[in-house]
Amino acid sequence: MRIILIGFMGSGKTHWGTQVAHRLQLPFFDLDEEVVKAENGTSVTDIFATKGEEYFRQKEKDIMEQLVDANESMVLSCGGGTPCFFNNIEYMKKVGIVVWLNTHVDVILQRLLKEKAKRPLIKDIDDEGLRTFIIRKLNERRMYYEQADVILDKEDAISMNDFIQTVLHA
């Protein structure tokens, strides 16, 4: 079984991914971390700055496909934009159970305010403009996210058991 977590940056994909993988005794992969490894430790921010978003998105796609090829079962936490490029959402649905963590805008905003410097798409946005950016980007990506097999709207309130049962019954 492959569980693929999607959602906006700061939605909790890595947090839930590690928890679910541990509970189900599956390997866990964070796609951004895997891209960084493949780029000899170059951060996502530096990849965006030096090679551009197009390069990053292609690398992200290639590594996702390599992980799928190498793992019959796993939990994969994807970057917020991953499902929106190269028909990735269709590929994800073909190879696994796709779970959208549809976290509330205000929760995402509070999380991202604490880690703006590590996020290439938001590092130069002032705090007041960040909420507007999140809403705009969410609206652009919603059509991809909504294609998920499972949509979790109450990410902060759901228990681990509920999360796992929801995914396993998808």
Image (spheres, helix red, strand yellow):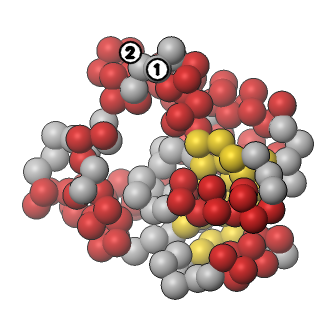
The residue that disc 1 covers is 41
Residue 2's disc is: none
Q: Is residue 33 left or right of residue 90?
A: left
Residue 51's disc is: 2
Q: How many marks?
A: 2
Residue found 28% across the figure and 65% down from its top:
109
* Residue 24: image location, x then y, percent: 80, 62
Q: Which is more N-terminal, label 2 or label 1?
A: 1
Crowdedness of circle 1 by 10 Å Cα count: few (<14), some, many (20+)?
Answer: few
Work out whether residue 86 or residue 100 is closer to the camera in this orientation and state it.
Answer: 100
Q: Is mark 2 on a helix, strand or loop?
A: helix
In the rendered structure, are the residues bearing label 1 and label 2 in contact, judged by CB atoms less than 8 Å apart? no
Q: In this view, does 5 lie to the left or right of 137?
A: right
* Residue 103: image location, x then y, percent: 45, 71
Amino acid carrying mark 1 in the image: Gly
How far apart, in angstroms, are the residues tagged by discs 1 and 2? 14 Å
Work out whether residue 54 or residue 60 is closer to the camera in this orientation and state it.
Answer: 60
Residue 159: image quadrant is bottom right
Q: Is mark 1 on a helix, strand or loop?
A: loop
Residue found 35% across the figure and 65% down from its top:
108
